[in-house]
Image: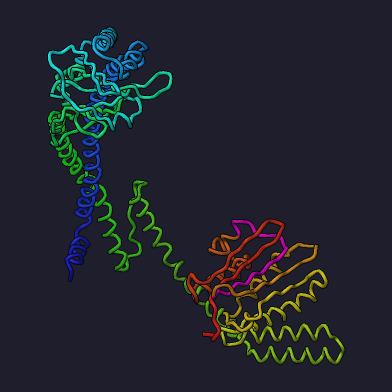
Amino acid sequence: MSSKQKIKNWFGNMPIQKKLIAVLIGFVLIPTTIITLSFYITAENIIKKDERVSTENTLKQVTNNLDAKIDRLTNVIYQISVDEEIQKNIEKLNNNSLRGVEKIKIEQGVKDRVIKLGVQINEISEVKIETLRQDRVIVKSALQEYTDVFPYGRIEEKKGANVWDEVLEGEVIPIYKELNNLEHQNPIGVMAVYVDKAYFYDILDDFEMQGVGMCYLLNEDGNEINGIQIPKENSKRYIYPLTSNDWSLLCIQNIDKINLDLVLIRWLAIGLFLVLVVLMVLISIAMSRTISKPIIDLEYSMKEFSRGNFDMTISAKYNDEIGNLRRCYNQMILDMGRLVERNLQEEKLKQEAQIKMLQMQINPHFFYNTLDTIHWLAQIHGENEIVEVSQAFGKLMRFSLEKNEIIPFEKELDAIDNYMKIQFYRFGNQLSLDEKIEEDLYYEYIPKHIILPIVENAIEHGFAGMEDEKKLIIRGKINDDQIIVDVFDNGCGINKEQIEDILYRKNISKEKHMSIGLANVQQRLALLYGEKAGIKINSKKDMGTVVSVFLPMNRRGE
């Protein structure tokens, strides 16, 4: 015996009171666990959300301040680059004929103009302007000149936009820009502006002093502009792109404080869980006793009943399930006699029904002989219509009683033709049949009574109540090793709900012969061929119906 079966037997043999206690405790643990987890998760989310919102708000403020400073700096650089006086002097410096004092005078004019424009920002340490002759005009405000190599490729690629580089010599951030002639927009030189990094990092230092975390400025490649290695410790990271250039602000938040709060919440959740479990266990024991005692009393009464004490009744004080069960038990005793009598009557009715079924099992040869007699009498009296009808009906009977369930398609068509002969006499010229069958299809084998019920359904139900001409079209073809037969009628149509009833046998009764017939075809095809066969129904109200049958090819009749 498996462990699973042993546990099942052990639980099954347990007294009902203990079962109830075990079940109730088991069910108690689930909601208790859910409540505790919900409390913990909710509290955790609140703490994390508050920390996140606070950090994000602070970072947004820092980002806005950085953007404002960068915009201010960018504006100064732009003023220098488009200044007409500076541009005229640079154009003169590009002239190879300039020499000596005249050149020095023009360079000084550039310096004076740059100083006048750049004085707005004290943190600008130095400005270098390089002419097309690669002569440099240096405007110093620092004690030393910064040595660097202009990134000409990046400058040319930016086409006049600012090129922000990494921190140079640990002190300044260089900003490069191509100088273009205002009129013709052709390059006339290159400018480098060196800004003290404190211009940006003072804001970051203020942020870090608040205890939120560490902040770093990242360039367009995602590297820290100061060239330092960013720590990869377990922490929360926020990245905000700056709108004024290609930099981003990275904040690494210290999560130790958050973890401390979460530990406190975790212990509170555990305490809540233990209190709820104890409370629910006590309630479970009380509830099990309340439920089990009436059941035990009922068990005793039923044992007495099994011993033959049919007068053993029990009181039913309450209107709960146990009270109703007791009342049902009392009623059961009264109904026992009636039930025995009813069973005797049902057995008698079954015997009578079996006798009637045996009487209705007439030998098929009796039908054939009777039809032959009608056929002979009709010929004698010249009743040709009766002759044809009886002849057609006889062929239909032989077709239906044929033992072979898989027949050539041609035989199914013959049965349809015989059926239609009878219907032509019924409807006269109001009924027409048009058969369009591919020649190869005649030799294919199909299950018997697949197409005929569809034709019958169209006439009996599709044309019900119609006074106009009744058209019936049968199309048959072979497509990709699949037999497809379409039966079209111009009858009253079928609504969507009726189609679902037909295909899925919903709400079918004896009166809905249409549903039973077509659903029977669908089920037979499914049993024989699975998903490879079936029927489809397309219909419009008052416009007609097309029932399509599809099944695999079968030349050998297997």
- Nearer to me, 377 or 290: 377
- Nearer to me, 222 or 80: 80
**Image position, residue 556 (x, y; %):** 54, 86
Image check: 336 left or right of 78? Answer: right
**Image position, residue 306 (x, y; %):** 30, 67
Image check: 24 left or right of 378? Answer: left
**Image position, residue 376 (x, y; %):** 80, 92
Q: Is residue 323 above or below residue 79?
A: below
Q: Is residue 513 above or below residue 77?
A: below
The quarter of the displayed image where residue 402 is located = bottom right
Residue at 39% from the left image edge and 61% from the top image edge = 332
Q: Is residue 526 visible?
A: yes
State the extent of the magenta-drawn residues as a range: 481-498
Q: How many marks overall?
A: 0
The N terminus sits in image quarter: bottom left
Q: Is residue 118 visible?
A: no
Q: Is residue 288 above or below residue 115?
A: below
